[in-house]
Each structure stands twice: as C-alpha cells, then as structure tokens.
Image (cartoon, helix red, strand yellow):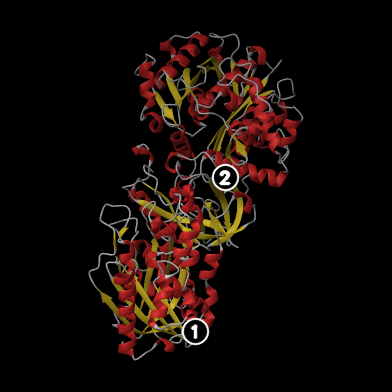
C-alpha cells in the first residue's frame, strides 16, 4: 500500500489488564452449569475482572502511560490526535479521548474523539491515527482500544467478556519506530450478530449466528483482501493475530486461512484473560510486539460485530529490541492476579440492581 | 491577661443522641443551667460567643449567633458562631475571655453546641472529613479516624507504643465516665472489650473512637473584679494559648508530634506562669485514644514517645498523680464536636470548685483544658486556677 | 445520598489535570515540594514557587485500612489509605490498591496508577485521579 513519504509506524505500545480474575468454574457454579463442558467449549479458563474503581477510561489511560514509556523520544506536546475505541465508555456523550488527552499532557490543539464498532473500535481508532500521520496532518497520534466488556447475567458471554486495553503511539516510520504498517484493508456489512440498544445495559447476540456469517466470514474476507492486494501468503507472516472472542475461534480461523498453530498461539490471550472487546486483538498485537524480533511480519485482523473486520500488515524494525523493557509486558499483567468469587464479580462490574 | 477573667457559672446538657431535641433546644437548656448557676439575670449577658463546627452541614442552619440569642430570649445581644473544627468552643471561650479582658463587656456567655444525629452515620463521617483537607485528603477517601490511625501506626513504629496502651486510655475514660451523670457512656469497659470491638481504621477500633453525639455546654464569664458578686468560688483564667499547623497531615515533617498542641501549650503555660508539673487535673482532646497519648507528650506531661508509659503507670487515672479526663473525656462523655471545648472547661471548673462529686480530684488547684481541631491543625489550651 | 454532600463539576475540574498528572509545586527558595498548588511556601514564606511534575514512585510512610467510609464510598468496600513519600520527598495522601493489608508495610515501594476516585452520582460527573499500588 502506498502511504506516501510518511509511512505510519508504531513508536510505543502499552497495555493494561486489571488484577482481578474470575474462574469460569465459579461463574458456571452460580448458574448450575457444568464447568467442564463450558470450559471445553470455549477453551477459556479464567477472565479478567475490573476493580470497583476501574472503568474503560482508567484502563485507557494506564495503557497510554505505558505506551508513552516505550516512546521516550515522543513528547506528549507533539501528539496531534487521540482516538479511543470502546463499547463500554462510561459517558455516552463525552469522549474518553478528552480525559486521556488531559492525563497524558497533550496540548490543547489536538483532535480527539471516541470510536464505536463493537470489538473493532480500537482498530478503527488506529486507522484514523494512521491516516492523519500519513497525510501529514499530525506529527504523532495516540490510538487506544479498551473495554470493560459487558455481558447479560446468565448469558454465555459472561464466561468470556473481560476487561483490558492497549494503546499505540503512531508516527512516521524512522529508526526510532518499532514497527511500520505495510498495508491496511477493511470490510463492512450490515450484519445483526451482536448489538446493544441505546439505554439497554447489556448486549444481545444471535448465538451460533455469530460464527460463520459473522466472525469467520468477515475476518476471512479482510485477510484475503489484504493478502491478494499485497501479493502476500500465510507463509510470509510470522504472526497471525485475529480478534479473540474465546480460545477456539481464533485457532479455527487461522487454520482455515492457511496459518499454522505456531503463528496464532503467541498472540492468543483469551484462554487466560478472556475477551476485552475493543482491546482484544490490539492486546494480542501488544503481546506479539513484546516478544517479536526485528524484521518479522504480523497480520492483525480485528473483528467488530455489526459487522466488519480491519486487516493490518505490520513489519517490525530494529528499535523494537531496545524498547520492549521500558514498560510492563502483557505477560506481566497476565501473571499478576487475584481471584474473586461470582458475587464480588457482580459487585465490581456494577451488575447488581440498585447500586 | 492572666487572672483578669473568671468563670462564674457552668451548665451543660447530657451528651447523648438527643433524637427529640433540636440544636436550639440543647443550647437553651445548657444556657439556662449556666445562668442559674452563675446567679445572673438574662439581661446581664452583654455578648455571646458560640462554638459550633457544622450546623450548616448537619442541619442546614448557619447564622447561629442571632438564632441562639433570639431563642435564649435576648435578641439584640451581640452574638456570633465561631468555627475551628473540634476546637470551636475552646476558641469561642478564648475570644470571650479576650473581649472581657479588653474591657468591652463585663459579663459574657460562652457556649458550644452540636447536633449530629439527624443524618446517617456515613453522612456524619463525610461532614467530619471537612476538618481535614477536603481536596487533598478527604477527596481521596480520608476520614478522621483514618488520619489518627496513620498517626497511631507511625507512633507505634517509631516509639513502640502498643495496642494495649491505646486500649487503656479508653478503659480509663469509661471508668471516669461512669461517675459522670452527664456522660454519654456510663458503663465501664475492659481492655478485651476494646480489642474485640469492630475495626474502624486499622489499628483503631470502635472503642478507640469518640462517638457521634448531640449536646451543649455553656459557661458564664465575668471580669475578675466583679466575680465575687455572683459566686464564692470564681475560677480564674490564668492562661490561654492557640496555634495552628498545616491542614493536611502529609504536609507535616513528623506526624507523631502535634505542633499546634506544643505551641498553644507554650503560650498558655507562659501566660499562666506555670509548668506542666503544676497541673493537677486536665481535660484533653481524646477524639481517638492515640490523641490522648500524644497529648501527654505534647503538653509536657511525658517525654516524646513515652506517653504510653504514663498510661501504663496509672499516672493519669483518678487517684493518680495527674488525673486526665475525669469527665470521661471525649470517648465516654461524648463529642458533640462544637460543644466539647466548653464541656472540658465545665469539668475543670467543677474540679477546681470541689464540686465534682465521685470523680473529684482532691485539692485540685490548677487545671488545664486542651481542645484540638481536625488532625491537630488547630489547638486551643486554657489554664485555670482557684486563685490568681 | 444527600445532594449537598457531593463535589460539583467546576471544583473538580479546577484540579483535575493536577490530579491526573501528579503536578505539584516546588519552592525555589527552600526546595520543599508540595502536592497541592501553592502561591506562598508554608515552610519559608517565599512566593517564588513553580509547578513541577512529580515522580510517580515512592514509599509508604504510614497506612491504614478504612472500614467506616463516608457516604460517597458506602458501596465501595474497605480500602487502604496511606501517606506516601514520593522519590523527591514530596508527601501526599492516596489510596493503595491491588493488594491486601498484609502485603504492605511502612517502607513498601509503590507506583501511581490512574483510577476512578468517585462520581457525583449515576448521572453525574465522574472524577479521576491517581492511586498507588505496590511495585512488584
């Protein structure tokens, strides 16, 4: 893809996952379901739970601070845009991006807004920032995907909807950037697989319909579009990172596209922390950046219900080695955990009526 | 100013949860008792100084000065509310004394009153936090017990003060309170009771903390040269001292010393021409047990860090060398915030008059009151004597 | 929860950015650093002060577990309050999160995290700031 002189690239990346976890066993027990059946079907063991003083905004800011730690050469005063993607922002009207901008010390003269496209709102934010960097409208930009994912009590989504997010500082490719974007393609249709009506607290979905006609169709469409247009094949990539609603879909779509297990495993976090919605595939990317070497190629394909998919081809650079250690890694956040029971989970996630 | 003003009458309501009384009722009840005790007429009162911390917060009523003069039956009398957190009425007393010593008035009413029980306990905790730094302490979840717990933890770490020593303060004050018919709590407690009571702010437990209370206390003061017209036992104000410290605990260099107490005591002792060893009886500000331990040290009754030793040795018990809080203190007598300062003065005056009944300290000549605001951001101290 | 007991938006906004970014004040005469905005140094009386971005790491100076919360924190559960001494000597008061009481002591190293401090009510303004968690 021809971006012109200013190829958008990643300067800093950072994630944040809350410390609390709930085991799927405890959720199943609360509803009288068989934990083994549930876990085998989803291939998820436990999920992250937001603390009572956390929300999508705090996750976004903590991730942004970590991204800035990895981009010491970027001053917050040089950031020209902040875009945040989410479907759980605490203000329906008032962008999380405004609070993030204040919290990082960005100047008053910036663009900012929030994006919504279900689980691919984060990559939408990324596309916007990439475009503004490539067009020369901004020097650097900050893109974030973060969610405290909602799920209807007693619904199967409760087993996977979790909290977390990642942030990326984007600028023109240089010797200080850790990875540049080779190409970006998206697909969009009108598909009612999963949605949330205004004034309704929890999302609804169409069960098995969320598989073939939704997740698989769009990820495969977007991935094939990018590979065809760019003349790439699965073996040209070191990593494949799709959206991760559970532990099974990402592996199935990887194999169907012709990728191998070793390519999808490194970015697969849902078995241990669940599905962060807008933060999901982006945190998979964050983890891959934590462990990758220079000159490796990554295919990132997010999926958002409603529906659509964003595909990115990313190539790592030399600078990635010296920047990895500047902020806590995704593995660090995954490994630090405190378990809560179902009642505490309900309280922390504001799912109890009346409070 | 030493000896120029004397207390000629005292009165107070029982401290308790007065569900059926309003703030103005409590004040008038205490005031009429003091006026009777002073043997004066209503029209003799030339001015009123009323200590109160939070009438606006708790009962949405400000402008207590004219309100209380009105309801006492003397509208037209100069009257104002003085606010200095928990030291409000101690400060009101000082201003009353200054106004008499300055020659402005010859007879003045000084009181303190608070009505706290009309809101839920957690709302009271919120209002009480306004004596801390609202923006940089309370905003982040600090409560008054939390501040003293932070102090207690440091004191225990720096000087080895123990949990049992703190408990002893509460046990002593409850025992004293059982001799005081005006006290909110009149039942003795044991160290086990304190250690088993629910945690409020680690390490402080329910029985380490003064309660939420309603009540009023009033004294009548007069120029010393006319005092004997009204009473055979005028009690003279020998010394007065007041000082402040940073509002936030975190802005102090050492949180185990309350500088406001040290400075106020210095001024009061100097004016009264006494030393700590001359004090026979004292009412100190035990909003929390740790505060009494700190008071021992910062008033000069014990060296810094050795306040715990003093309570262990029984020095401050009734029967000991310097009984402290014979009224039961804030812990047992109760702590309607704005009323406490004057209530402390009522107790010391009764002691020096030899009218303290079962809790009398025999032969008490010199008494001290220490009234403190917030986490020690303010402190007012007075020294009283039987003779000048 | 009574209407008169909650902060209102302008007052929160006045200090919001200082809270988010841990911006304090330093006295240029005596060097002392304060968490709050100051025009006059309470230590030496100088009016020569400037804003300073504070370090985000420090040590616990004292701490306590609060079990009797004020009305606005009633449903939040017990929480730890501490006085923290930052790396440059500035002391501030904040909540300690992501740990139990047994995991900390005076001297434990902590670092700042961005958290929700509270909200006016379910339909009102949310206010954010820094809390601290043990560094592990």
Q: Nearer the viewer, residue A285 or C84?
A: A285
Residue C56 at what x, y percent from top left? 53, 62
- The chain letter under disc 1 is A
User: Does A46 appear above or below B380?
Assistant: below
Q: Which structural element holds mark 2? A: strand
Residue B309 placement (x, y as % from top left): 75, 35
Q: Which residue is mark 2?
A: C65
Residue B366 shows which numbered tag?
none
Residue in the image at 49% along x and 44% along y? C77
Name the foreground residue: B134 vs A246: A246
User: Residue A163's x, y, as percent?
Assistant: 43, 61
Apparent side of residue C21 relative to residue B190 in the rendered image (left or right):
left
Q: Quadrant where the C terminus of chain A lies?
A: top left
Residue that carries the numbered disc 1 in the rendered image: A319
Give the residue drawn at x 48%, y 69%.
Answer: A269
Quarter where residue C19 is shown: bottom left
Percent of width and height locating residue B93: 51, 25
Q: Furthest residue to the right? A: B313
Residue C26 higher or lower than A67, as above or below: above
The answer to whether residue A4 is visible is no
């Amino acid at each position: 893809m021809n971006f012109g002189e200013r190829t958008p690239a990643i300067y800093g990346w950072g994630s944040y996952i809350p410390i609390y976890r709930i085991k799927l066993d405890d959720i199943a027990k609360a509803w009288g379901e068989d934990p083994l059946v549930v876990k085998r079907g989803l291939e998820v063991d436990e999920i992250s739970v937001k603390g009572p003083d956390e929300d999508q905004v705090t996750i976004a800011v903590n991730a942004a601070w970590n991204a800035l730690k990895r981009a010491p050469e970027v001053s917050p005063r040089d950031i020209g845009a902040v875009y945040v993607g989410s479907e759980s922002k605490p203000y329906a009207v008032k962008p999380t991006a405004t609070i993030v901008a204040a919290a990082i010390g960005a100047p008053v003269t910036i663009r900012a807004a929030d994006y919504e496209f279900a689980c691919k709102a984060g990559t939408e934010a990324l596309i916007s920032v990439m475009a503004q960097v490539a067009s020369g409208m901004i020097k650097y930009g900050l893109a974030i995907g973060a969610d405290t994912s909602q799920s209807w009590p007693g619904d199967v989504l409760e087993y996977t909807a979790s909290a977390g997010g990642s942030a990326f500082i984007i600028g023109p490719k240089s010797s200080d950037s850790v990875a540049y974007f080779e190409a970006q393609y998206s697909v969009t249709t009108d598909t009612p697989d999963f949605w949330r009506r205004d004034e309704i607290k929890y999302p609804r979905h169409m069960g098995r319909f969320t598989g073939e006609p939704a997740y698989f169709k769009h990820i495969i469409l977007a991935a094939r579009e990018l590979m065809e247009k760019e003349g790439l094949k699965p073996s040209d990539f070191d990593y494949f990172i799709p959206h991760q609603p559970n532990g099974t879909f990402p592996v199935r779509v990887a194999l169907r596209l012709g990728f191998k297990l070793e390519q999808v495993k490194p970015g697969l976090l849902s078995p241990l922390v669940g599905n962060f919605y807008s933060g999901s595939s982006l945190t998979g990317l964050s983890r891959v950046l934590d462990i990758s070497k220079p000159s490796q190629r990554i295919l990132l394909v997010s999926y958002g219900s409603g529906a659509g998919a964003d595909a990115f081809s990313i190539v790592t650079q030399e600078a990635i080695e010296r920047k990895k250690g500047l902020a806590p890694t995704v593995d660090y956040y995954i490994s630090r955990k405190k378990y809560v029971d179902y009642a505490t989970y309900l309280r922390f996630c504001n799912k109890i009526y009346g409070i | 100013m030493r000896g120029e003003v004397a207390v000629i009458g005292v009165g107070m309501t029982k401290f308790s949860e007065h569900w059926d009384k309003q703030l103005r009722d409590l004040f008038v009840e205490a005031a009429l008792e003091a006026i009777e005790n002073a043997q004066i007429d209503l029209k003799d009162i030339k001015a009123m100084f009323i200590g109160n911390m939070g009438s606006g917060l708790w009962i949405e009523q400000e402008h207590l000065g004219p309100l209380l003069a009105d309801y006492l039956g003397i509208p037209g009398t100069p009257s104002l509310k003085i606010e200095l957190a928990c030291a409000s009425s101690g400060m009101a007393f000082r201003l009353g004394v200054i106004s008499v010593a300055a020659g402005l008035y010859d007879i003045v009413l000084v009181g303190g009153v608070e009505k706290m029980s009309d809101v839920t306990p957690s709302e009271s905790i919120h209002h009480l936090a306004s004596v801390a730094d609202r923006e940089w302490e309370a905003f982040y979840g600090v409560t008054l017990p939390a501040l003293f717990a932070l102090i207690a933890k440091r004191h225990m770490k720096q000087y080895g003060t123990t949990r049992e020593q703190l408990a002893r303060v509460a046990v002593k004050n409850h025992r004293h309170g059982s001799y005081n018919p005006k006290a909110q709590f009149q039942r003795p407690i044991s160290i086990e009771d304190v250690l088993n009571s629910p945690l409020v702010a680690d390490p402080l437990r329910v029985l380490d903390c003064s309660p939420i209370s309603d009540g009023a206390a009033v004294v009548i003061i007069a120029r010393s040269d006319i005092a004997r017209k009204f009473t055979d036992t005028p009690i003279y104000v020998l010394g007065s001292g007041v000082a402040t410290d940073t509002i936030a605990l975190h802005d102090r260099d050492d949180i185990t010393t309350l500088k406001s107490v040290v400075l106020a005591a210095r001024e009061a002792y100097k004016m009264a021409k006494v030393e700590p060893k001359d004090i026979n009886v004292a009412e100190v500000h035990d909003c929390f047990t740790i505060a009494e331990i700190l008071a021992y040290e910062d008033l000069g009754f014990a060296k810094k860090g050795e306040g715990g030793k003093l309570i262990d040795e029984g020095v401050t018990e009734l029967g000991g060398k310097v009984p402290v809080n014979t009224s039961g203190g804030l812990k047992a007598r109760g702590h309607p915030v704005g009323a406490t300062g004057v209530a402390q003065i009522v107790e010391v005056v009764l002691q020096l008059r030899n009218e303290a009944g079962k809790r009398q300290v025999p032969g008490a000549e010199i008494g001290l009151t220490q009234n403190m605001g917030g986490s020690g951001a303010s402190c007012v101290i007075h020294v009283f004597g039987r003779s000048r | 929860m009574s209407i008169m007991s909650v902060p209102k938006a302008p007052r929160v906004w006045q200090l919001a950015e200082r809270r988010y970014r841990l911006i304090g004040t330093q006295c240029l005469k005596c060097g002392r650093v304060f968490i709050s905005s100051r025009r006059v140094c309470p230590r030496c009386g100088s009016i020569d002060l400037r804003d300073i971005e504070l370090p985000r790491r420090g040590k616990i100076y004292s701490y306590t577990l609060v079990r009797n919360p004020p009305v606005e924190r009633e449903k939040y559960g017990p929480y730890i309050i501490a006085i923290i001494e930052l790396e440059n000597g500035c002391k501030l008061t904040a909540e300690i999160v992501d740990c139990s009481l047994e995991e900390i002591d005076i001297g434990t190293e902590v670092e700042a995290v961005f958290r929700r401090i509270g909200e006016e009510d379910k339909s009102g303004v949310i206010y954010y700031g820094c809390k601290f968690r043990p560094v592990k």
